[in-house]
Image (cartoon, rainbow, N blue to C red):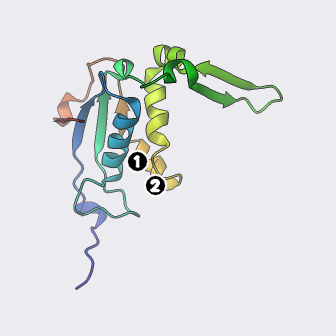
Amino acid sequence: MKTYLPKVNEIDKKWYVIDAAGKPLGRVASKVASVLRGKHKVIYTPHLDTGDYVIVVNAEKVVLTGKKLEQKYYRHHSGYMGGLKEIVYKDFLQKKPELAMELAIKGMLPKNRLGRKMIKKLKIYRNAEHEHQAQQPVVMDIK
């Protein structure tokens, strides 16, 4: 018996809405990354993009457990000497919650062309409103 390999035009892409309000950042990110990769489907193939589109709402209401709000930093470097920039995650979540969520999810995806293609199927919104009602997204619950 041969292994089934789905064709690119046979892969059905669905839209899901995930509400991040009151849920830990890492749990939401791991579930979203799994859906973007397509691991929840029977036809999952590691070298094909079998994943679905994901809309994350209420990104500003995501929580961090423990003392991570005060102890965790978002760091980036400008490339120049002394160009290290640090922001405490508490301030980072207040200023740019969409970016914090996107970076957490992006870190869980493959670091190649396939991962860059998968991250384009992610839509993150600060509030509960989103502009993708025409795609008829299905609500997905995270436990």
In the image, what residue occupies the spot 45% across and 48% down? 109
Identify the element where label 1 is drawn. helix
In the rendered image, the quadrant that contains the C terminus is top left
In-front residue for pair 49/143: 143
Q: Position of residue 98 (x, y in %)?
A: 43, 25
Q: Do the residues labelled 2 and 1 touch (CB within 8 Å)?
A: yes
Left or right, 97 with respect to 32, comes to right
Q: Where is residue 54 in the image (x, y as percent from the top left)?
A: 30, 38
Residue designated by label 1? 118
Cα distance, mark 2 to mark 1? Answer: 6 Å
Q: In this view, does 3 lie above or below 62?
A: below
Identify the element where label 2 is drawn. helix
Q: Is residue 3 above or below residue 20?
A: below
The amino acid sitting under disc 2 is Leu
The amino acid sitting under disc 1 is Met
Quarter occupied by residue 50:
bottom left
Quarter occupied by residue 26:
top left
Most extreme residue toward the bottom is 1
In the image, what residue occupies the spot 30% across and 63% down? 8
In the rendered image, the quadrant that contains the N terminus is bottom left
Left or right, 73 with respect to 33, comes to right
In-front residue for pair 114/84: 84
Q: Where is residue 141 in the image (x, y as percent from the top left)?
A: 20, 35
Q: Is residue 120 above or below residue 129?
A: below
In the image, what residue occupies the spot 24% across and 30% down? 132
Q: Residue 114: give its label.
A: 2
Q: Residue 78: give its label.
A: none
Q: What is the number of callouts on the image?
A: 2
Q: Is residue 4 above or below residue 16?
A: below
